[in-house]
């Protein structure tokens, strides 16, 4: 008798139809689980190759601005989420004394909960986003690189830079089927005190298994234009992007 779960395995990365050996898992399934668990732990704990990311920013003709949060190490980052939601005093003063320029988007990159994700997919996603924004005619400010940041950090940075939109690319919490997933969060009129209900999220950016960098950038550009046109983001801004075409363009 055929087990229908084996057919379903072709359509998901979830651990179903693993088989069994006696009352336990087969050795191959157990080793695969342990490997995935180790990869998730490494993604959280390993340092971010921020210098490589800075070079990728500069190669696009943009300014790479290195900032910091008050977080002392990764242990504190995990134990004190509030510390990752704000800049340290030196970084805040640096932005406060900086000459203001008219920009539409404050773009922030942080390793968040997965340095692996930013190291592996960050440069390609950055390239796609910058290209999409330039086609849209939106003005980018400096690209702020901030280790150990949380999503709400973009609110403070966007406000200090006087941007109309704040966008943060951040490593998502790793799971046992994905240790290298990136997320993008978009907020209109960024300011300290914005809630998650005022943000739009594009998640599971991890080619080839997840969303491609090109598709994520196209969706971000569309949501950014709609946020500026409607004057809002979050629950009030629905994803009404036209249907995807095979070549990841839309009409």
Image: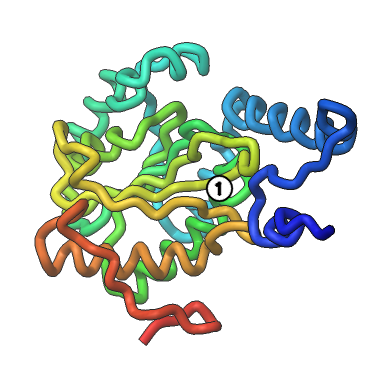
Image point (64%, 25%), residue name? 41
- In this rendering, the count of numbered labels is 1
Mark 1 falls on what kind of element? Answer: helix
* Mark 1 neighbour density, 10 Å: few (under 14) some (14–19) many (20 or more): some
Q: Is residue 159 left or right of residue 122?
A: left
In percent of width and height, residue 36 lies at 71, 34
Q: Is residue 93 left or right of residue 204?
A: left
**Quarter of the image with the N terminus in it:** bottom right
Q: Is residue 142 visible?
A: no
Q: At 54% across and 49% down in the image, what residue appears?
A: 122
Residue 197 percent location from the top left of the image: 20, 44
Vertical comparison of 64 with 228: above or below: above
Q: Say whether residue 234 is left or right of residue 125.
A: left
What quarter of the picture does the C terminus occupy? bottom left
| Residue 78 position in % (x across, y down) | 46, 18
Which of these two is toward me, 162 or 77?
A: 77
What residue is disc 1 on?
55
Q: Establish if 190 lies above or below 42.
A: below
* Rendered view: 86 above or below 166: above
Q: Quadrant of residue 175?
A: top right
Is 242 drawn above or below residue 81 in the view shown?
Answer: below
Tell me where residue 198 appears, x and y as whole percent.
19, 46
Spot the residue most to the front.
Answer: 1
Type of colouring = rainbow
User: Measuring 44% from the left and 18% from the top, which residue is drawn there?
Assistant: 77
Q: Quadrant of residue 237?
A: bottom left
Q: Residue furthest bottom?
A: 251
**Is residue 161 in view?**
yes
Q: Nearer the viewer, residue 39 or 19?
A: 19
């Amino acid at each position: 008798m055929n087990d229908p779960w084996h057919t379903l395995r072709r359509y998901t990365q979830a651990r179903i139809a693993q088989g069994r050996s006696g009352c336990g898992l087969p050795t191959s399934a157990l080793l695969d689980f342990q490997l995935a668990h180790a990869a998730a732990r490494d993604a959280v704990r390993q340092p971010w190759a921020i210098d490589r990311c800075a070079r990728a920013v500069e190669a696009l003709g943009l300014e790479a601005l290195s900032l910091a949060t008050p977080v002392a190490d990764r242990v504190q980052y995990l134990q004190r989420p509030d510390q990752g939601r704000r800049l340290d005093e030196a970084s805040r003063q640096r932005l406060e004394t900086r000459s203001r320029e008219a920009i539409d988007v404050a773009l922030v990159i942080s390793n968040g909960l997965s340095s692996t994700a930013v190291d592996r997919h960050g440069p390609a996603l950055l390239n796609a986003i910058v290209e999409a924004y330039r086609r849209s005619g939106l003005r980018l400010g400096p690209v702020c690189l901030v280790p150990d940041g949380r999503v709400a950090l973009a609110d403070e940075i966007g406000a200090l830079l006087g941007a109309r939109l704040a966008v943060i690319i951040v490593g998502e919490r790793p799971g046992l089927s994905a240790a290298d997933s990136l997320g993008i969060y978009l907020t209109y009129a960024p300011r300290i005190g914005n809630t998650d209900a005022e943000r739009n999220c594009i998640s599971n950016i991890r080619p080839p298994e997840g969303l491609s960098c090109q598709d994520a950038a196209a969706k971000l550009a569309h949501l950014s234009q709609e946020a500026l046109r409607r004057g809002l983001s979050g629950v009030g801004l629905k994803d009404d992007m036209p249907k995807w075409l095979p070549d990841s363009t839309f009409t």
